[in-house]
Image (spheres, helix red, strand yellow):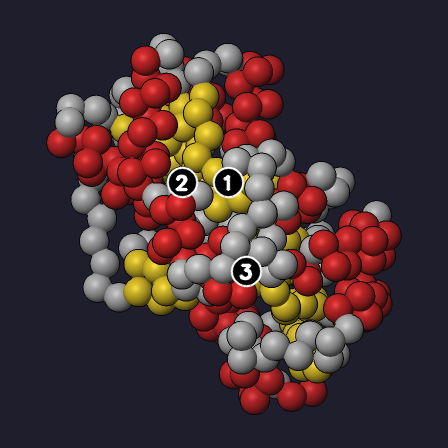
């Protein structure tokens, strides 16, 4: 098992803020819109240095999406910023009609996704957003795993033509990816090669998968771990190559098991290479108020849950 270490923890939303500021310096066409959450979305540096390219929309998320769509007509590259719940569920009609249907070059940037929003509870912990967004034709869906990868993704999507949903979170998590990485949309990252089981993870669950892999190695189980940071378009080739080798797969995500990464992987396998699969995801329920760590444990989204799923799926080979 390849060893991954870290010296610092940081929230992925700060990676977005740093990436937005950097891409703002590089590309004068980049503009930012915020729904009254500058601090939460870490958009302060962009606002300070590029005030003429920053739009404080207020608590009017639907208007923000319409404004962003309109700005693309003049060649601008708008980044919208608010919580994931408000970036998707609250404004789905506006995204569908004004952005996705007409292929507008809007970057929908969503913080505080999943259970790790924590104490704010179920009304804010959206667990359906990946499913909502990946179903929209032409929508790219990205869910990076740490600060560095989120920063790199934020920069990379400015050069990608078309609507993008970029999902990130609130809690501080280990920084374990390369600070100078090149982010490739639609290209999976091989975290660790193995032969006994494929663990395909996204977002905060990538680090949990690494922790699980280390413990599994101590028990003689050689896990292949893949980071799917781009859920759509999905790197089907990487998934099939891995599962063909290992013969079974565990998918891990901070999302409802219905409609997320696991379903996307299952579709690929059903079509081109059936194999036993276990899901590590929220089992079709809403969340609740609590600390991120306690919620991840209660809803089965931690390393121990991945280990349990691995042992179960290996028996099904």
Dot 3 crowding, Cα within 10 Å, few <14, some 14–19, many 20+? some
Q: Which residue is mark 3?
A: 121
Residue 249, disc: none
**Residue 268 in view, yes or no:** yes
Q: Residue at x 81, y 50 (%)?
A: 96
Q: Residue at x 60, y 60 (%)?
A: 124
Dot 1 crowding, Cα within 10 Å, few <14, some 14–19, many 20+? many
Residue 75 x/y as whole percent? 77, 67
Q: Are marks 1 and 2 in contact (CB under 8 Å)?
A: yes
**Residue 230 in view, yes or no:** no
With 123 as the anchor, is 219 left or right in this view?
Answer: left
Q: Which residue is mark 1?
A: 282
Q: CA distance from mark 1 to mark 3?
A: 14 Å
With 49 as the anchor, is 116 left or right in this view?
Answer: left
> Closer to the camera, 166 or 294?
294
Q: Which residue is mark 2?
A: 300
Dot 2 crowding, Cα within 10 Å, few <14, some 14–19, many 20+? many
Q: Quadrant of the C terminus?
A: top left
Mark 1 or 3: in front is: 3
**Nearest to N terminus: mark 3 or mark 2:** 3
Q: Count the marks: how many? A: 3
Q: Secondary structure at mark 3?
A: loop
**Nearest to N terminus: mark 1 or mark 3:** 3
Q: Residue at x 58, y 47 (%)?
A: 286
Q: Secondary structure at mark 2?
A: loop
Residue 136 x/y as whole percent? 74, 42
Q: CA distance from mark 3 to mark 2?
A: 17 Å
Q: CA distance from mark 1 to mark 2?
A: 7 Å
Q: Quadrant of the N terminus?
A: top left
Q: Residue at x 38, y 36 (%)?
A: 226
Residue 249 x/y as whole percent? 40, 24
């Amino acid at each position: 098992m390849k060893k991954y270490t870290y010296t610092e923890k940081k929230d992925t939303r700060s990676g977005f803020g740093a990436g937005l500021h950097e891409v703002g310096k590089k590309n004068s066409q980049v503009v930012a819109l915020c729904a009254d959450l500058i601090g939460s979305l870490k958009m302060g540096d962009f606002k300070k240095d590029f005030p003429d390219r920053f739009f404080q929309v207020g608590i009017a998320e639907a208007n923000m999406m319409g404004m962003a769509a309109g700005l693309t007509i003049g060649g601008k590259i708008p980044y919208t910023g608010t919580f994931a719940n408000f970036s998707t569920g609250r404004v789905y009609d506006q995204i569908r009609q004004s952005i996705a249907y007409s292929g507008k070059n809007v970057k929908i940037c969503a913080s505080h996704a999943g259970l790790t929003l924590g104490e704010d509870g179920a009304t804010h912990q959206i667990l359906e957003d990946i499913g909502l967004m990946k179903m929209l034709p032409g929508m790219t869906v990205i869910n990076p795993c740490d600060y560095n990868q989120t920063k790199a993704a934020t920069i990379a999507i400015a050069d990608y033509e078309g609507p993008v949903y970029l999902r990130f979170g609130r809690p501080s998590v280990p920084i374990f990816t390369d600070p100078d990485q090149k982010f490739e949309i639609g290209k999976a990252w091989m975290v660790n090669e193995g032969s006994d089981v494929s663990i395909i993870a996204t977002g905060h669950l990538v680090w949990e998968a690494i922790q699980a892999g280390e413990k599994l190695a101590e028990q003689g189980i050689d896990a292949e771990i893949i980071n799917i940071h781009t859920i759509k378009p999905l790197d089907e080739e990487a998934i099939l190559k891995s599962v063909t080798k290992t013969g079974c797969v565990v998918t891990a995500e901070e999302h409802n098991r219905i409609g997320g990464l696991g379903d996307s992987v299952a579709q690929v396998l059903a079509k081109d290479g059936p194999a036993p699969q276990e899901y590590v995801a929220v089992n079709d329920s809403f969340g609740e108020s609590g600390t991120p760590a306690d919620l991840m444990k209660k809803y089965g989204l931690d390393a121990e849950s991945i280990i349990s799923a691995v042992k179960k799926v290996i028996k099904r080979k």
